[in-house]
Amino acid sequence: MSMDYLARLAAAQSAEERTWIITESLVNSLPDDVRSAVWAAAIPHWFDEKILAALRPELAQDAARLYVELQAFPFVEIFQGRGHNTHELTRKLMLVHLWNENQEEFRALSQRAAEYFLHAEDIICRIEGAYNLLVADETKSPSIMSSFGWELNNNFQFSELDALVNDALEHINAGRLAGNARGWAFFFKARLERQAYRMDTALALLERARADASDDNLKGYVVEETGDVLQFLDKRDEALARYAEALGLFRAVGSRLGEANTLQAIGDVQRFRADNDAALKSYEQALGLFRDVGDRGLFRDVGARLGEANTLVAQGQLLLVDDPKRADALLEQAIELFHQIGDRYSVPAQIGNYGWALLRLNQAERAQSYFSRAAELFEQVGMANFAEQCRTMVSRIETGKILTTADAMYKEKNFEQAAAEFRRAIESEPSARAWNGLGSTLESLERYDEAIDAYTHAITLEPDSAYLYRNRAGIEYQRKNYERAVMDFRRATELASDDSYAWNGLGNTLESLERYDEAIDAYSHAIALDSDSAYLYRNRANDLLELNRLEEAEQDIARAMELEPEHPYTHARQGYLALARGEFADAVLHFEFAASKEDKAEWKLGVGLAKFGAGDVDSAKAIIADASTKADADDKKSFQKWLERLVKSRPELADAARGLLL
């Protein structure tokens, strides 16, 4: 081992550099024929005896022996199903060295590899052939990348297109591919990124593609694709500007197919904006161009017929409401074109798209038949996942019909039948909507335990839906399970801080727990969201009265009076404020007004309290005795509190008050 070799190893700055020194030393030590085979084997991604013979025709007779010898080297490994390959790192270093030191040899070996692989029918071999041809002749590389890329794209071979693009990127990253060929690679990579909904990445790649493009045809496709990404991002004015630019570029180079695709895209934007007349005009122009392209080569012809079919589908979707027969006829024409080009995927996909379009038009029943047909056809072409998605939509639409019936029965207060229909919907497809509907129906039937169970099922399915927690909290409140109600109302306000009903419910519950300061805070949140609802001011005023914060209570009651001056609860709050201030005559007037509007025991008890405070004990006793027969526990509790406040302010009434205890 020479001192020079050891010195180079010691001076190496990276693992890659050390690997290359070791590899180079080993390769240079080999016999000429073996060394020649090692270099050739690094050109393709895999090799076997036949590939070695094709790359080194002068060594063809020894290819079998050389293939066996190469397998013994540490940098050679098995390539599953195809032979062997040079280890990735070693291969990368060898290709960098060969490109830098002897490009003529690199291109010659790549040309032989391309000729060998391109004769195969196997698509993977054809991609390998294109990979090698891209660097064999740089004058042909743009057309290779363009034509093969469009072939794979138009035949929906997207995983194969991704493989081709990644192979091109290998050359690009190594500095072996530039110009329009590199631009086409970035363009197709951007299309794949858009299909994967990675729009920012797609836009960045399109910028790189445009920077490389010196050909107006490539520029046109790059600009049009940029428009497609912008359209997806709802930047439709920007998208239309790109499409207009693309039209100019395509017309300048006479690319009628590019022009047609762009007109179809413009029609899509117009259709989204409900400018249907303009969209139909754009689609008609596009159809004329697609049909005029004619037989300009297999790939172009496939692209033209694919574009024509997609345009017919877009036209049909515009006519689904006004002319459904014409819409179906256009779909059938498109299906025939898809069959002609062997596109088995687009037939069920576009039938399903009719279903989606009808759903957006709120025509679920019509959509159902399209989804059913699409599911059957997806199943026939072996696309089980898509078939299942369509069957799910069929089931969902059927469930929607049941829910519509259930909702109608609920509105008609036919609660028993509504509950039965909601249960049918749950059996068909459990959903938060169905469980919530069942919960509301059972609540109306006063079957509270079952209602809580239904709301809990709904929450399990949609744990981030505030209204579900609010609904369950409402029942817990009615049942006086206040701590549970507080938890659910708080969760509702966390999920939807702008839900004034949830804040009000939280305030009511905290008030029942006599946590008045917290209740006031909750009501204040609700008022901030809904400042014109009188009941919120009345509710907050009630707690302010409990805390004897009379001036603040007066302000809230005054605001409630502005909003609902005739409401019994507004006058009742005014009555309590008058009681607290010892203004018993005013209190009587307000409570009597409230009682005249609503036969409520609480208001009559208020009248009795006001008369008692004014010293009219006998009249007070009679009114209170009568009202107590209709009073519930909450009414009686409130009465006792106010009676205690009265006695505290007028101790001379203490003895008489004992006869008023309920």
Image (cartoon, rainbow, N blue to C red):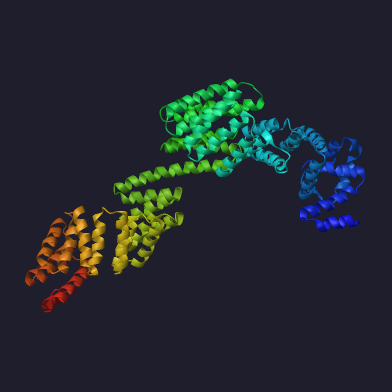
81 to 341, vertically: above or below:
below
| Residue in the foreground of this view, choosing between 417 and 468 | 468
Left or right side of 82 for 217: left
Q: Position of residue 27 (x, y in %)?
A: 87, 48
Q: Position of residue 582 (x, y in %)?
A: 13, 69
| Residue 403 at least partly seen | yes
Quadrant of the image occupied by residue 143: top right
Left or right side of 588 for 120: right
| Residue 47 at least partly seen | no
Quadrant of the image occupied by residue 449: bottom left
| Residue in the foreground of this view, choosing between 158 and 231 | 231
Q: Position of residue 302 (x, y in %)?
A: 62, 27
Q: How many marks?
A: 0
Q: Quadrant of the C terminus?
A: bottom left
Which residue appears at 40% of the width and 50% of the height? 434
| Residue in the foreground of this view, choosing between 170 and 344 | 170
Q: Position of residue 80 (x, y in %)?
A: 76, 46
| Residue in the foreground of this view, choosing between 381 and 334 | 334
Which residue appears at 32% of the width and 51% of the height? 415
Q: Quadrant of the N terminus?
A: bottom right
536 to 51, vertically: above or below:
below
541 to 180, vertically: above or below:
below
